Amino acid sequence: MSNYVLSQAAKARECLVPVKSKAAYSKVYEDFQEWRRENSVNGVDENILLAFFEDLSHKYSPNTLWPKLSMLRKVRVTVLAILAVVATALASVTWEGDCHCWDEFYKFSKNGVYFCKGIKHNRVFMCNDVKPPICKCEVDGHIISLDLGETNCLSVVQGLAGVWCHNKKDFEKYFSTHPEHDITGTY
């Protein structure tokens, strides 16, 4: 990316954050970045934000978390990721009998709210959520299926060639009805 583009992005970012609140906004973003480093997390998606705010919920009240969420959104995190967090909060299941998970997922409760957690990869999804497609990628001439929750082939393919799942149309259809899960906005 050119220095000009980076410079323009920095100027735009400066305009988004109120001058009086800049330190508070920067602190929230730095805390998020530090949490990502400590937990070896790349990128930002619904599960990452949920985990971050779950950790924060042990230190802060809900009245404090909402401003932090707002600051994080304004500083750098995408609107779709924020919408996913809000949708998740609205869809909370507080009674175990109302929580239904997919095969290879089990119910667990955190602060009185039930979720579905993967046995194999520890990914967390909301109870009763519609199961997303499984990403299929070509590696060395063979088609492999990735873990549930993967939306592209970047974890198994080098470079940008072949980055999309072979079943991209399945994801386009899924995300057309569940845009809150398309955190990257690429489908």
Image (cartoon, helix red, strand yellow):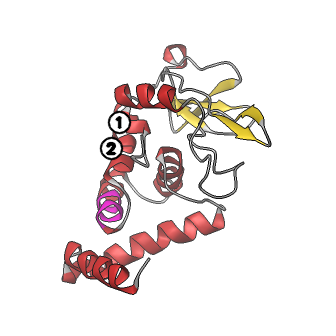
User: Is residue 89 placed above or below 69 in the rendered structure?
Assistant: above
Element carrying mark 1? helix
Q: Nearer the viewer, residue 78 or 24?
A: 78
**Picture coordinates of residue 120, whole percent (x, y):** 76, 34
User: Is residue 71 placed above or below 178 in the rendered structure?
Assistant: below
Q: Give the extent of the magenta segment.
A: 67-74
Quadrant for residue 182, please give it.
top left
Kind of residue at disc 1:
Ala
Q: Where is mark 2, residue-wise? A: 83
Element carrying mark 2? helix
Callout count: 2
Evaluate if marks 1 and 2 touch, with contact meaning CB atoms under 8 Å apart. yes
Looking at the rendered image, the quarter that the C terminus falls into is: top left
The label number, if any, that marks residue 148 in the structure image = none
Looking at the rendered image, the quarter that the N terminus falls into is: bottom left
Kind of residue at disc 2:
Leu
Q: Where is mark 1, residue-wise? A: 87
x 63%, y 39%: residue:
123
**Picture coordinates of residue 91, whole percent (x, y):** 38, 28
Gap in angstroms between the C-alphas marked 1 and 2: 6 Å
Horizontal side, residue 182 vs residue 18: left or right: right
**Picture coordinates of residue 125, whole percent (x, y):** 54, 33
**Picture coordinates of residue 101, whole percent (x, y):** 59, 20
Quadrant for residue 34, please give it.
bottom right
x 49%, y 15%: residue:
98
